Amino acid sequence: MQRHLAGEPQDFADVPYDFSAVPGFNQRVLRATLAVKAGRTTTYGKIAAAMGEAPDASRAVGAALGANRWPLLIPCHRVTGADGKMTGISGRGGVTKKVKLLTPEGACLL
């Protein structure tokens, strides 16, 4: 984790997460979010589409990411609004924290 935050992106997709207490839809969201690699961003709607859901499921995707038990490891900070706006981070620091997490990953924020 320290290497990742120091600007050496790490991939946490192979961590053995215990999803047993996570509802099924949320599990699907988290697994789809693991596919978003460091330096990249996607949207709530694209996560919904990757899961085979309709675009209007984007709000449910956002709610599932808001309940993410493994922020940083399951990169909900890489998910933006449809217009690219930095939205939807529920942790302390909000959007400012999202930008701070994306910057060392080399994500294009403009």
Image (tube, rainbow, N blue to C red):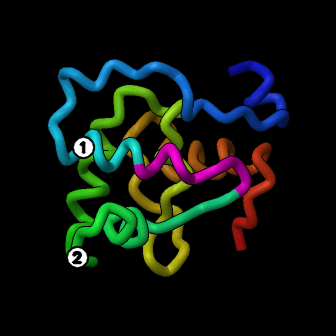
Residue labelled with disc 1: 26
SS for callout 2:
loop
Q: Which residues are magenta?
A: 32-39
Question: Depth check: 7 or 25 in front?
Answer: 25
At 35% from the left and 71% from the top, the residue drawn is: 49
At 52% from the left and 71% from the top, the residue drawn is: 85
Mark 1 crowdedness (10 Å alpha carbons): few <14, some 14-19, many ≥20: many
Is the C-beta separation of discs 2 and 1 under 8 Å?
no
Is 34 situated left or right of 96 in this image? left
Residue labelled with disc 2: 54
Residue 19 is situated, as x and y percent measured from the top left of the image, at 28, 25
Mark 2 crowdedness (10 Å alpha carbons): few <14, some 14-19, many ≥20: few
Q: Is residue 104 above or below residue 99?
A: above
Q: Where, quadrant-wise, is the N terminus in this rendering?
A: top right
Question: Depth check: 43 or 31 in front?
Answer: 31
SS for callout 1:
helix
At 29% from the left and 47% from the top, the residue drawn is: 28
Residue 93 is situated, as x and y percent measured from the top left of the image, at 51, 39
Q: Is residue 91 above or below residue 85?
A: above
Is 36 situated left or right of 55 in this image? right
Tell me the chief SS of the magenta region: loop
**Residue 54 is inside the magenta segment:** no
Residue 96 is situated, as x and y percent measured from the top left of the image, at 59, 49
Is 26 situated left or right of 6 in this image? left
At 55% from the left and 34% from the top, the residue drawn is: 13
Of labels 2 and 1, earlier in sequence is 1
Rendered image quadrant of residue 14: top right
Q: Is residue 55 above or below residue 12?
A: below
Q: Amino acid at mark 2?
A: Ala
